Image (cartoon, rainbow, N blue to C red):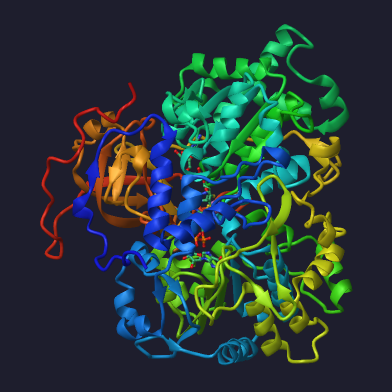
Amino acid sequence: MTGKPPEQDVDESALDVTPPKRWAAGIPGVVVSLKRGVEQMGAVRTATTLRLLNQRDGFDCPGCAWPEPQGAERKVFEFCENGAKAVAEEATRWRVGPRFFAEHPVAELAERTDYWLGQQGRITHPMVLRPEATHYEPVSWAAAFDLIAAHLRALSTPDEAVFYTSGRTSNEAAFLYQLLVRGFGTNNLPDCSNMCHESSGAALAETTGIGKGSVTLADFAKADLVVVVGQNPGTNHPRMLSALEEAKAAGARIVAVNPLPEAGLLRFKNPQNVRGVLGKGTELADVFCQIKLGGDQALFQAIGHLLLRWEAERPGTVVDQAFVDVCTQGFAEYAENVRSVDWDAVDTATGLPRAEIENVARLFAESERTIVCWAMGLTQHRHSVPTIREIANVALLRGMIGKPGAGLCPVRGHSNVQGDRTMGIWEKMPEKFLSALEAEFGISVPREPGHDTVSAIRAMRDGRAKVFMAIGGNFASASPDTAVTEAALRSCELTVHVSTKLNRSHVVHGRTALILPTRGRTERDTQAGGEQFVTVEDSMSVVHRSRGRLEPASEHLMSEVGIVCGLAEALFGPDHPVPWADFAGDYDLIRERIARVVPGCESYNEKVRRPDGFVLPHAPRDSREFTGTRTGKAMFTANPLTVLHVPPGRLLLQTLRSHDQYNTTIYGLDDRYRGVKDGRRVVFVNPADITALSLADGQLVDLVSEWPNDPTGHPERRAEKFRVVAYSTARGCAAAYFPEANSLIPLDSTAETSNTPTSKSVVVRLEPHVPNPHDPPPPPTATTTQEGANTRT
Ligand SMILES: Nc1nc2c(c(=O)[nH]1)N[C@H]1C(S)=C(S)[C@@H](COP(=O)(O)OP(=O)(O)OC[C@H]3O[C@@H](n4cnc5c(=O)[nH]c(N)nc54)[C@H](O)[C@@H]3O)O[C@H]1N2
Ligand SMILES: Nc1nc2c(c(=O)[nH]1)N[C@H]1C(S)=C(S)[C@@H](COP(=O)(O)OP(=O)(O)OC[C@H]3O[C@@H](n4cnc5c(=O)[nH]c(N)nc54)[C@H](O)[C@@H]3O)O[C@H]1N2
Ligand SMILES: [Mo]
């Protein structure tokens, strides 16, 4: 056993700020990953565990959904710094058992940060918090399942229960979970994707007929232009940097579009090659467009406008007319819309010089093979869906879907979020899936769409939902409008969390609360039928096996599959048409059913046993067919331009991830690339805005979000005590970390069509913090940056 979890909680007064880095990974990344591993797992366990990470006979990284190389391309060490941290978190030797819960009343735990809670270790026993009790106490699995079943049966309709999923759940567990929920009688299956790539799914399903990306990993080495918009791969998808490096080596240009000059987009020191370790690394972005938050729709409209103008000047040189004629519809309406683009609006929305936009448009015009990648910078705005539609328009115009080295690439977050959706975790699965489920199992399932994340919170808040169950995730911290979400959870009769680690959702509980501890990806899963593996799908639709080898953190853990089956047996009794007990003993039996219900999964058991698994069909990618759209053709769309207007004296705030967290799991308090150390309550502001707002670098401020349209009559929300950090960000745009800033995001401020919270565009004012009697003494002042050190040069 090495070290101990922290006893003290975060002390923000230790915060230190230095100039940001201009390159990512390399040796410091390796050192950090090993250090974290050894601290939490010990040296031997670190070595054996990391060796299995992302290998064919090993387990899928619980970090991001970036794919593994196929065939001989796969390296002996196929992981990144942040993947190693994710593994260390799960494979930690620290434990949270009955004694811990006896020593810490829930009221005390509720005062702790997510960081402290997560660092305490793996949960070892099922625990219950009874009505009015002050402490969680151990409970048997059987009693826990009976308790949930009794609460569910007592509801006046199944729609009073909500079943959340986070994207780490395996395909097998997800398939059974949605079967349980639909068999019970509701489609209330919100998931983290509602807050994540829902906008991508909505826009792509409408325009290409399938809500998934059309690119494979091999396409990167063939591309001649890769555009990375609204994504920070150096932190959130570090293995993507290797793909970018490869693209670059093969001659591709890279364009980064981001309000922040993220280190990983600028230069990459690949820890896997000599040049990366000893040399200066590879310069990645050829062009960096420091765009304003929410300006991407305008940018892509302007690019479309220029492409059409150049086509008119030299017909036959820019538009892929053959593709447009054969494969698409709606071109005329689209062309009409962007022909009249309002350049003043483009200027206001993007803040980019006209020449820079022309330069990027020129790269699109000259490229034969373009890939556009994006993540949360595009999906979490009011106009996210039209923004992504606009990217699809440009790709269609140039015929960039369904050919090697080209395509649309929404880069997913959670390692199996895409697989969970394929397996039916969605509040509005299509009729075809639902009827296949009925035919396969001889049950009937409801058709009425269920709650997504935001509407689930409203339902709990308004007393229309009384039981909340989550398989993974941290709903309390990940959701918007923290005060509203927490009150919603607290108003439930029962909250149930299937979890590996302690988090805030366990201490913001219903009248009765259960924590059901589960095995993680890294752990061995032995059942009646022998040792099991599970399957997952990555961001590029590759489905493959994952098998852990470590001894489970405690003998009392159940697998997620086992938990779903146990609950189903308690709820439905022994005569149910679904053979739950058999499923729990042998996961091949679940996969046989998946093969018959889920499109593209025929012969599933055989195909997932192939060395690299198999790739799910994707008609646009495979054969340039767009059978999934309304018209059977790829759809151009004409979208009115949205320009976000920020009142004078206000900033537009985005909430993003530091380099030392996995969503609400806080690994540590440093954001190495951005130069922040030992603290998280910071707000990054452009130095010119700091001056214009009469603030000072290093000053403590309260962030007050303003949303006059709030339908619940709360136009303002306040988050206290953030330190101003002078930083290179687009003018008028600020940034703070998720989840600390979630309290500022109004529940009802969501994206059109996808209903995703607008976590990347919140209007805020910064008010100097007025010390109150509870504040600790102020820190010494010498630690913040020298004037301008963090700004773009
Ligand atoms: N280590 C680690 N890996 C992770 C995660 C993690 O927390 N930690 N989370 C996982 C999950 S669930 C997800 S969804 C992904 C998230 O991956 P990212 O989307 O990279 O995550 P964010 O930190 O939210 O970063 C958003 C990026 O978009 C930029 N941006 C914000 N608004 C705009 C905009 O309006 N326009 C443009 N052009 N850019 C904008 C921000 O400056 C930032 O660089 O990562 C996954 N991988
Ligand atoms: N303001 C703001 N809010 C955001 C975002 C943002 O950018 N800004 N991003 C959004 C995005 S993209 C996402 S995806 C969501 C994330 O929302 P969630 O997926 O709900 O949150 P996580 O923090 O990923 O969940 C972490 C918890 O999962 C549990 N866990 C970990 N591994 C396992 C496992 O193997 N099995 C089980 N059962 N449990 C496990 C642990 O108990 C851990 O505490 O947050 C969203 N919220
Ligand atoms: Mo995500």
Q: Quadrant of residue 715?
A: bottom left
**Residue 328 to residue 383: above or below:** above
Q: Quadrant of residue 505?
A: bottom left
Image position of 527 (left or right of 95): right
* Residue 615 in the image, given as x and y percentages of width and height: 78, 47
State the quadrant of the C terminus: top left
Give whichever of 78, 429 is nearer the camera. Answer: 78
Give whichever of 700, 518 is nearer the camera. Answer: 518
| Residue at x 26% of width, y 39% of height | 725
Give whichever of 118, 325 is nearer the camera. Answer: 118
| Residue at x 52% of width, y 31% of height | 273
Q: Is residue 65 visible?
A: yes
Q: In this figure, what is the number of numbered marks?
A: 0
Give whichever of 60, 615 is nearer the camera. Answer: 60
In the rendered image, the residue lying farthest to the front is 44
Image position of 749 (left or right of 12): right
* Residue 712 in the image, given as x and y percentages of width and height: 44, 63
**Residue 343 to residue 242: above or below:** above
Q: Quadrant of residue 375?
A: top right
| Residue at x 84% of width, y 59% of height | 606
| Residue at x 46% of width, y 22% of height | 352
State the quadrant of the N terminus: bottom left
In the rendered image, the residue lying farthest to the top is 314
Image position of 37 (left or right of 392): left
Q: Is residue 756 visible?
A: no
* Residue 262 in the image, given as x and y percentages of width and height: 43, 34
* Residue 405 in the image, given as x and y percentages of width and height: 72, 28
